[in-house]
């Protein structure tokens, strides 16, 4: 069984003008694709070759973990955005964000701060841990999946995610993600599934 590159959930130009097709052609077409190619080379002929991507992430380390987790993280990130996204969540997730963060504006501040202060490459996440929503950041390929946390939404803050469109202005990219791209339908679905599991 080889690991496949999942299709993008929208066209490469669908997030314009916020994130350009040029960025996605590199980020999805080159970076994400390379993690898949690398992982398949690394697991060929090993016990991992029979495992799902999630199983590989839980059981591996070093190069195999880095490539496997980056495949999963990127697929989750594409789904964390949508054309005409942003706005605010509705329903149960909205109520939970109000209860745990003291309002959506406080959530936005904390999420943006986590994404801005992840030093070097990594990710910021909204997760459910136990009965609490939390904002966490992870370095490089690290993922909440191995930390007993259920991811609800993520932003990639590796420079390759924003440099072509925003150059060094990571805070502008983060604000654009929150205001214009965040897919709250996806986060709400993840919240529902995490509570049910
Ligand atoms: Mn990336």
Image: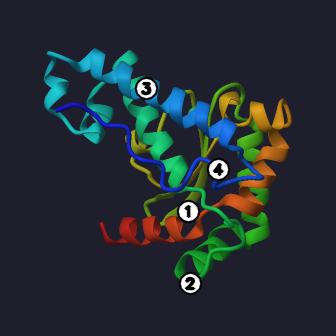
Q: How far separated are the C-alphas under marks 2 and 3?
A: 36 Å
Residue 78: where, in percent of width, then height?
53, 49
Verify CB contact (< 8 Å) between mark 1 and mark 2.
no
Secondary element type, mark 1: strand
- Mark 3 closeness class: few <14, some 14–19, many ≥20 residues within 10 Å: many
- Mark 4 closeness class: few <14, some 14–19, many ≥20 residues within 10 Å: some
Q: Which residue is mark 4?
A: 13
Q: How far separated are the C-alphas under marks 4 and 3?
A: 22 Å
Q: How far separated are the C-alphas under marks 4 and 2?
A: 30 Å
Of callouts 4 and 2, which one flags the residue occurring earlier in the amino acid sequence?
A: 4
Identify the residue at horizontal 55%, vertical 75% (top origin).
Answer: 93
Secondary element type, mark 3: helix
Q: Which residue is mark 2?
A: 91
Of callouts 1 and 4, which one flags the residue occurring earlier in the amino acid sequence?
A: 4
Q: Which residue is mark 1?
A: 133
Q: State which image quarter holds ligand 1.
A: top right
Q: Is residue 129 left or right of residue 165?
A: left
């Amino acid at each position: 069984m080889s690991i496949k590159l999942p299709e993008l959930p929208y066209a490469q130009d669908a997030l314009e003008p916020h994130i350009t097709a040029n960025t996605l052609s590199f980020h999805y077409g080159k970076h994400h694709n390379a993690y898949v190619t690398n992982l398949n080379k690394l697991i060929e002929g090993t016990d991992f070759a029979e495992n799902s991507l999630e199983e590989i992430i839980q059981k591996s380390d070093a190069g195999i973990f880095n490539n496997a987790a980056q495949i999963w993280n990127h697929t989750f990130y594409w789904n964390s955005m949508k054309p005409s996204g942003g706005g605010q969540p509705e329903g149960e997730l909205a109520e939970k964000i109000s209860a745990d963060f003291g309002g959506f504006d406080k959530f936005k501040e904390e999420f943006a701060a986590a994404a801005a202060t992840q030093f070097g490459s990594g990710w910021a996440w909204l997760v459910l841990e136990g009965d609490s929503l939390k904002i966490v950041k992870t370095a490089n390929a690290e993922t909440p999946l191995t930390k007993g946390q259920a991811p609800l939404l993520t932003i990639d803050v590796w420079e390759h995610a924003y440099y072509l469109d925003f150059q060094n202005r990571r805070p502008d990219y983060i604000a654009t993600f929150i205001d214009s791209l965040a897919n709250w339908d996806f986060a709400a679905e993840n919240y529902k599934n995490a509570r049910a599991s």
